[in-house]
Image: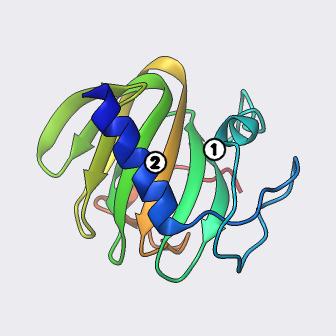
């Protein structure tokens, strides 16, 4: 099972086509059709503490797909994205997740979560931290495409 998940992740990365390798504190160069990115190097850039719920680093941002990593610092209220599907691979940590009307479901290191556009999702308690996630958005999700199911639950999401 673990081999299947690893192969799926590897083939997804290859299919999307990573951009050129980036040096520390820089995003990968855009526009290349191939490349290599050391995900662990970017995880090291995520701060231990943050004023928002999430710290997000965009690695690839193309019209048809995007790849990013993020660290969650708190619960994320239910929300959805109108234009993109999401595939979340848990790199580190463990948390409760809610998808559609299901949950809580506990997912941790090595687990892959996914849902289609328009599917409400969020996370509950972080059970083990830090919670680091590698995300594949297809199509690439615009940062403003977060629609809160209950707008009163919106928190200071990105800490801006």
Could you classify mark 2 by the number of other residues whose Cα lies within 10 Å: few (under 14), some (14-19), or many (20 or more)? few
Q: Position of residue 40 (x, y in %)?
A: 68, 34
Which quarter of the image is occupied by the N terminus?
top left
What residue is shown at x 30% (from left), y 43% (from top)? Answer: 113
Label 1, on which residue?
A: 52
What residue is shown at x 17% (from left), y 35% (from top)? Answer: 103
Could you classify mark 1 by the number of other residues whose Cα lies within 10 Å: few (under 14), some (14-19), or many (20 or more)? some
Foreground tag (2 vs 1): 2
Image side of residue 119 versus residue 12, left or right: left
Query: Does the image show residue 10?
Result: yes
Which quarter of the image is occupied by the C terminus?
bottom right
Q: Quadrant of residue 30?
A: bottom right
Q: Quadrant of residue 146?
A: bottom left
Tell me if label 2 and label 1 are in contact, CB under 8 Å: no
Residue nearer the viewer, 136 or 118: 136
In the rendered view, would you say 18 is above or below 40?
Answer: below
Q: Position of residue 93 (x, y in %)?
A: 48, 22
Q: Secondary structure at mark 1?
A: loop
Which label sits on residue 10?
Answer: 2
Q: Secondary structure at mark 2?
A: helix
What residue is shown at x 75% (from left), y 32% (from top)? Answer: 44
Image side of residue 121 versus residue 137, left or right: left
Distance of label 2 from label 1 (alpha carbons): 30 Å
């Amino acid at each position: 099972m673990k081999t299947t998940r690893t192969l799926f992740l590897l083939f997804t990365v290859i299919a999307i086509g990573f951009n050129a390798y980036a040096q520390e504190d820089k995003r990968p160069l855009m526009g290349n059709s191939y490349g290599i990115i050391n995900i662990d190097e970017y995880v090291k850039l995520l701060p231990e503490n943050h004023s928002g719920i999430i710290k997000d680093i965009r690695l690839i941002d193309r019209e048809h797909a995007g790849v990013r990593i993020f660290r969650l610092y708190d619960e994320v209220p239910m929300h959805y994205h109108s234009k993109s599907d999401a595939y979340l691979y848990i790199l580190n940590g463990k948390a409760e997740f809610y998808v559609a009307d299901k949950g809580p479901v506990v997912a941790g290191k090595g687990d892959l979560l996914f849902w289609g556009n328009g599917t409400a999702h969020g996370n509950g308690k972080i059970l083990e931290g830090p919670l680091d996630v590698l995300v594949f958005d297809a199509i690439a999700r615009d940062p403003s495409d977060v629609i809160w199911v209950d707008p009163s639950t919106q928190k200071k999401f990105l800490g801006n």
